[in-house]
Image (cartoon, grey):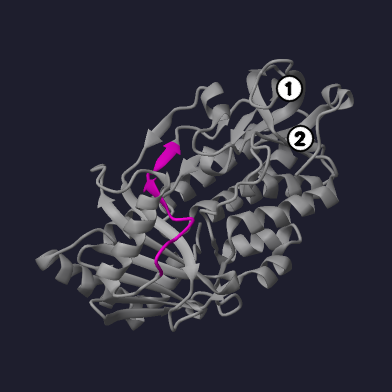
């Protein structure tokens, strides 16, 4: 996956140290490496994660991949989703053609996160060989006037840690960010919480290029095409913090819950067992700050957005595009460029708030609804999918304006 640290590494001050080798940290590293800047990535995992939670690459995210030269490879590996259809009890409430948002890029690309990460790892190795350090745990972050000092341990231990220095440290280490915690940045909860179960199975639908959304009385069931003739199914199991769904992670209970829920709500038979079925809780948070001196947050370390709607990874890539420019300006100035980094913080917090509101709306629309509430929800879907609003809805669904 990458290179081990050497004594020469320890003696060198980086321009940027990125903590976290997921899709956002890797994209940022590629952007900075393209500028010829000394950048390295420290990833606590020793090997790539086997399961992919994120699958949707929206048009702005695809353009971000284009910016580092992997967009075409992603297009070849992925499946284009050109439209979406919303139904309730077998009746179509509305349909959406993504070409209405952008005829030049008229689809959302379905590509498992593991494959996206593989493309970015390979690209970073081309741009800056040895820049990715797997199995490297960063701790003891200490800021000084001109640089940041931090320790790098191996194998999940701080024993025999190596001291490294960088002019900036970027936390791209996810919702449980250690960088954010060490910087003392508060993690504020935002509205929106629900429990879901999901899994990937062979596609037995008659819509191989479409997103299918079943807004049923007992809650939403969604499905999306994947490469290799597969389809991902996602179903809500509990609204709010009830704890009524299956326990988190992969389990036989999650498989049974997914199969049973999909069949009960939609009539679809997706198989007898879903090997990778897992339950998860969707939550939303926003960091109080994204910049603390020479420490900067990006992606899920900066904001946790419900995966319903597929915004999180793409939002992080848009963070990375902005942060690439801000860090380049700060590094060129020879000292902390407050204007560039403060501008990054303002713009990306604003975009995160917008994405969190959109995700909250998506979750609410997919919550259980009966009687008058169900009738009102179905009427709202029909209205939003009608001519005057359809293009605006397509733009929101494909993340324009973030």
**Residue span colored magenta:** 271-286
At mark 2, the secondary structure is helix
Of the residues under marks 1 and 2, which one precedes in the sequence? Answer: 1
Kindly give the residue lying farthest to the front in the view shown: 272
Q: Is residue 322 visible?
A: no
- Whether residue 138 is visible to the viewer of this picture, yes or no, is yes
Dividing the picture into quadrants, the one containing residue 108 is: bottom right
The one of 53 and 188 positioned closer to us in this rendering: 53
**Residue closest to the eye, 391 or 239:** 239
Q: Residue furthest left?
A: 371
Q: Is residue 369 left or right of residue 399?
A: left
Residue 281 painted magenta: yes
Is residue 66 located in the magenta-colored stretch of the structure?
Answer: no
**Of discs 1 and 2, which sits in the foreground?**
1
Q: Which residue is mark 1?
A: 147
Q: Left of 164 or right of it: where is 184?
A: left
Determine crowd level at label 1: few under 14, some 14-19, many 20+ residues with C-alpha closer than 10 A.
many
Q: Nearer the viewer, residue 279 or 65?
A: 279
Q: Quadrant of residue 106?
A: bottom right
Rendering coords of residue 353 (x, y %): 42, 47
Q: Looking at the picture, does residue 49 appear above or below residue 54?
A: above
Observer-nearest residue: 219 or 320? Answer: 219
Distance CA(mark 1)–CA(mark 2)? 11 Å
Total label count?
2
Up the image or down, 339 lies above or below 33; here it is above
Which residue was labeled with disc 2? 331
Q: Residue at x 72, y 59 (%)?
A: 67
Residue 85 placement (x, y as % from top left): 38, 77
């Amino acid at each position: 996956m990458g290179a081990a640290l050497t004594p020469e590494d320890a003696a060198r001050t980086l321009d940027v140290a990125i903590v976290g080798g997921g899709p956002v940290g890797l994209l940022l590293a590629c952007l900075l490496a393209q500028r010829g800047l000394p950048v390295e990535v420290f990833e606590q995992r020793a090997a790539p994660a086997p399961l992919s939670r994120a699958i949707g690459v929206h048009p702005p995210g695809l353009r971000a991949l284009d910016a580092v030269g992997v967009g075409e490879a992603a297009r070849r590996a992925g499946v284009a989703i050109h439209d979406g259809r919303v139904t309730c009890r077998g009746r179509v409430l509305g349909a959406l053609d993504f070409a209405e948002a952008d005829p030049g890029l008229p689809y959302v690309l379905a590509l498992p996160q593991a494959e996206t990460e593989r493309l970015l790892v390979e690209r970073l190795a081309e741009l800056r060989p040895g820049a990715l350090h797997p199995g490297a745990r960063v701790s003891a972050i200490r800021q000084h006037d001109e640089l940041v000092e931090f320790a790098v341990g191996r194998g999940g231990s701080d024993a025999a840690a190596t001291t490294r220095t960088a002019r900036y440290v970027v936390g791209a280490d996810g919702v449980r960010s250690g960088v954010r915690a060490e910087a003392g940045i508060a993690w504020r909860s935002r509205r929106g919480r629900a429990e879901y179960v999901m899994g990937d199975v062979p596609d037995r639908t008659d819509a191989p290029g479409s997103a299918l959304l079943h807004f049923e009385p007992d809650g939403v069931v969604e499905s999306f095409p994947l490469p290799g003739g597969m389809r991902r199914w996602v179903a809500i199991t509990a609204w709010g913090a009830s704890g009524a769904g299956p326990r988190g992670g992969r389990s036989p209970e999650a498989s049974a819950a997914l199969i049973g829920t999909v069949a009960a709500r939609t009539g679809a038979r997706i198989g007898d067992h879903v090997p990778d079925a897992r339950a998860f809780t969707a939550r939303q948070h926003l960091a109080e700050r994204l910049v603390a001196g020479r420490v900067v947050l990006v992606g899920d370390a900066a904001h946790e957005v419900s995966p319903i709607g597929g915004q999180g990874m793409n939002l992080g890539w848009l963070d990375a595009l902005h942060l690439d420019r801000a860090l380049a300006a700060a590094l060129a100035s020879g000292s902390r460029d407050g204007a560039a980094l403060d501008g990054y913080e303002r713009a990306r917090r604003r975009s995160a708030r917008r994405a969190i509101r959109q995700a909250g709306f998506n979750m609410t629309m997919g919550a259980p609804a009966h009687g008058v509430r169900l009738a009102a929800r179905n009427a709202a879907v029909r209205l939003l999918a009608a001519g005057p609003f359809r293009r605006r809805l397509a733009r929101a669904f494909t993340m324009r304006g973030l």
